[in-house]
Amino acid sequence: MELTREERETFIRTNDAADDWEFFTLSPTWARKLERLGYRLEKDRQGGWSCRVPRAFVTIRRPIKRTVTDRQRQNLARIHSERRSPGLDHGKNELTVKNRCAGRPAQDTIQKR
């Protein structure tokens, strides 16, 4: 049975005597994230996954409140555009590489995997 998005819950809990957090999820996305981080997940009868995470690995932080001026926004946009490779046109299914060498075709197309 497929769960709805509202039913795919995730709980993180601990108590004062524990040295770790108990992580329980019905979300396959969170289960994959935890597996990629190296945690061994146990499957339960409800179809969820659980594991224990060291207490130091879970933090609750105050949100960062940042005000960006128009000038800073323009500088960030300029930096972002400079980081994109000037010789690449980024498409959905292929990259078009513009060849800037004389005597070669104007562009080559490379299929993405």
Image (cartoon, rainbow, N blue to C red):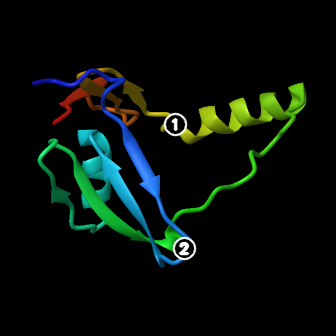
Left or right: 67 as drawn, with respect to 44: right
Left or right: 96 as drawn, with respect to 75: left
Question: Where is residue 3 drawn, in percent x and y?
Answer: 21, 25
Residue 84, numbered label: 1
Residue labelled with disc 2: 56
Q: Tell me if label 2 and label 1 are in contact, CB under 8 Å.
A: no
Mark pair 2, 1: CA separation: 37 Å
The residue positioned 31% from the left and 32% from the top of the image is: 8
- Image quarter hosting the C terminus: top left
Judge depth for marks 2 and 1 and give the one in front.
Answer: 2
The residue positioned 24% from the left and 59% from the top of the image is: 35
Residue type, mark 1 in image: Arg
Question: Where is residue 112 drawn, in percent x and y?
Answer: 20, 33
Q: Is residue 88 above or below residue 12?
A: above
Quadrant in the picture for residue 43? bottom left
Mark 2, other Cα within 10 Å: few <14 / some 14–19 / many ≥20: few
The residue positioned 21% from the left and 61% from the top of the image is: 41
Nearest the eye: 7 or 92:
7
Quadrant in the picture for residue 37? bottom left
Residue type, mark 2 in image: Ala
**Label 2: element kind:** helix
Quadrant in the picture for residue 26? top left
Mark 1, other Cα within 10 Å: few <14 / some 14–19 / many ≥20: few
The residue positioned 27% from the left and 21% from the top of the image is: 4
Question: Where is residue 95 drawn, in percent x and y?
Answer: 29, 28
Residue 17, numbered label: none
